Amino acid sequence: MTTERVVIAEILRSRGNRGEVLAESTTDVPGRLEGLRQVHVRRANGMELTLDAEQVWRHGEQWVFKFAGVDSIDAANALRGAEVWISKLERGELPAGEYFRSDLLGCLVWDEATGRNLGTVTGFEQYGGPLLLEVAMEGREVLIPFVPEICRTVDVQARRIGTAVPDGLLDL
């Protein structure tokens, strides 16, 4: 199997008694989960499986997956903590100006005005507003809003994000 994987959901727990699982979406592509037919699953113990998705539907803020052959609570519980992933080639395309989070991880963040290296993107946070980049900077983590006014240039090929950070933001 390819090592170029993109995690699109994380299985939280079983749901019901027919082998369904409840999952948290991690995909940026609208409609990605509803259209799934076959996925790769990496269980918490590292075991890899390829499963056919019989049905996938939204349930509140989360998603329900029904996989072929997973027909009991015990079988569903065996998937608790697993990652649902697809190959990077299958992830689809985003509109211009939008980026996959997986492409932003590891990008160098720099200040366009001074040329100063601010740090590297290590993760993300989102609390209902804009996406926040978690940036490892000088032994600490800073949060930088991923908005065009601040993150002005994004070059995923060069693995760089040019910023115009407002005064005081890096001191928070």
Image (cartoon, rainbow, N blue to C red):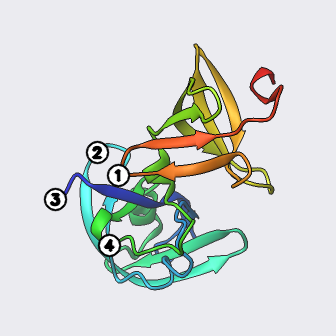
Q: Earlier in the sequence, mark 2 or mark 3?
A: 3
Disc assigned to residue 46: 2
Which residue matches tag 4? 90
Rendered location of residue 52, percent (x, y): 31, 79
Query: From the viewer's perspective, is 167 left or right of 94?
Result: right
**Cα separation between marks 2 and 1:** 5 Å
Alpha carbons under labels 1 and 4: distance apart: 20 Å
Amino acid type, mark 4:
Glu
Residue 1 circle label: 3
Give the foreground label among 4 and 2: 4
- The label shown at residue 117 is none
Q: Residue furthest top?
A: 139
Q: Nearer the viewer, mark 1 or mark 4?
A: 4
Furthest residue in direction front, as rendered:
113
Q: Is residue 16 left or right of residue 66?
A: right
Q: Which residue is mark 1?
A: 43
Mark 2 Cα-neighbour bin, 10 Å: few <14, some 14–19, many ≥20: few
Query: Helix, strand or loop at disc 4?
Result: helix
Q: What kind of element bears circle 3?
A: loop
